[in-house]
Image: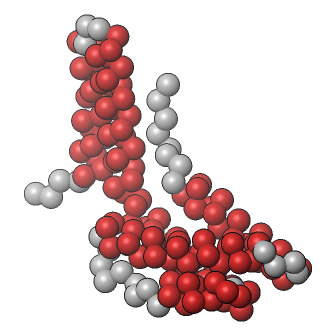
Amino acid sequence: MRPDTSRTLQGVALNLLTNVMGETRTPFGQQTVGIAGQLLFWIAEECERGADRLVVENRATRQLLSDGLPLAGTAAKSVEAALATPPAADFRISSLQAENDALRKGLIALHAAVESVDSDEARAFNERIWAELVESTKRRQFAVRLG
């Protein structure tokens, strides 16, 4: 048997919110059970989507770094170092996140460089960076919201 992590966590969360909450006598206890249930729902969702989210984001960030290198100016070495980051060797969240962290470091340097250039090309590329940052934020939103 292989337990489904996401479904298991959702089941525990649902049990806390439907069964344990009613048995909890104090407002503090009820609040604590409610917070634990919400956290479990969020963890379940992230278990399901985390690797995919990071693969998509790492691909998009690499593309931005590659396309933006000509605009990097003094940040070129940081962008090149980020692009030299090897892709994660596996699909573990920790491996994908380490790759993401290195790529984001380069993106921060590129973004700062692009924002300091006064040209139509730099402004257009700045908009591309912001569009990806907005999408990245959307990818992290949770579907399950209580309260």
Front one among 102 and 97: 102
Q: Is residue 124 visible?
A: no
Spot occupied by residue 20 in the image (x, y as percentages of width and height): 24, 20
Q: Looking at the rendering, which quadrant does residue 108 occupy?
A: bottom right
Q: Is residue 58 above or below residue 15?
A: below
What residue appears at the point 68 percent right and 73 percent down from the top-left corner? Answer: 111
The total of numbered circles placed on residues is: 0
In the rendered structure, the answer to whether residue 64 lies left or right of residue 102 reads right
Instruction: Assign the N terminus to one quadrant of the image.
Output: bottom left
**Image coloring type:** secondary structure
Spot occupied by residue 139 in the image (x, y as percentages of width and height): 54, 58
Spot occupied by residue 109 in the image (x, y as percentages of width and height): 61, 76
- Residue found at the far left of this picture: 1
Spot occupied by residue 53 in the image (x, y as percentages of width and height): 47, 65
Q: Is residue 41 above or below residue 127?
A: above
What residue appears at the point 71 percent right and 92 percent down from the top-left corner? Answer: 70
Q: Is residue 46 above or below residue 129?
A: above
Q: Is residue 75 visible?
A: yes
In the rendered structure, the answer to whether residue 118 lies left or right of residue 81 reads right
Front one among 116 and 33: 116
In the rendered structure, the answer to whether residue 62 lies left or right of residue 25 reads right
What residue appears at the point 36 percent right and 57 percent down from the top-left corner? Answer: 48
- Residue found at the far front of this picture: 74
